[in-house]
Amino acid sequence: MYDKSQETNHRFYEEVLKLQMQLFLLEMWHIFEDEIDRRKRSLQSGTLYERFIQLVQEYCMKEREVRFYSDRLNITPKYLNYICKVNTRITASEWIQRYVKERITILLQNKNLNISEIADEMDFSSRSFFTRYVKKMLGVTPKEYRERL
């Protein structure tokens, strides 16, 4: 097509130029529409991601399962993880763990609260389960964490 557009003495020279212009416009339209679709998807997933983070900030003291948050957003846990990965490259469960870890460290720094009270406040079924959870999250037991402060 390009070669034909260079032949100014070609019988259909003007038609070839018009077709090239049409092709160019269609290609631009295609690119533009793809970008609009991508932005719509990004905006929608970004909004869901922001709502997810707000929910985590509000409920992470008692809710540590992705299913809880996905149910609140009316989406599947798999889709929630996808949204988080697209927006931040971090899964939903990792975000929940980060917020929980932050809250645990803040509560453990408060020496006025004993470990059982913290476990109760964070809705753990027992102090021993809380201790195992903290050990998994921080690498030390709650008591060891406090001793290091």
Image: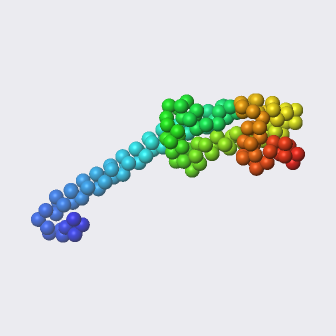
Q: Is residue 42 above or below residue 17?
A: above
Given the current orientation, which residue lies at the most extreme left position? 11
Q: Name the residue rendered at 87%, 36% in the picture.
A: 111
Q: Position of residue 142 (x, y in %)?
A: 81, 42
Q: Nearer the viewer, residue 17 or 39?
A: 39
The quarter of the picture where residue 124 lies is top right
Locate residue 23 relative to residue 80 in the image: left or right: left
Q: Nearer the viewer, residue 2 or 97?
A: 97
| Structure colour scheme | rainbow
Locate residue 13 relative to residue 114 in the image: left or right: left
Q: Position of residue 13 (x, y in %)?
A: 16, 63
Residue 83 seen in this snapshot: no
Q: Position of residue 148 (x, y in %)?
A: 87, 48
Q: Nearer the viewer, residue 31 or 61?
A: 61
Q: Name the residue rendered at 61%, 37% in the picture.
A: 65
The quarter of the picture where residue 104 lies is top right
Locate residue 6 relative to residue 95 in the image: left or right: left
Q: Position of residue 93 (x, y in %)?
A: 61, 43
Residue 76 seen in this snapshot: yes
- How many dots with numbers? 0
Q: Is residue 136 above or below residue 115?
A: below
The quarter of the picture where residue 134 lies is top right
Q: Is residue 84 above or below residue 59?
A: below
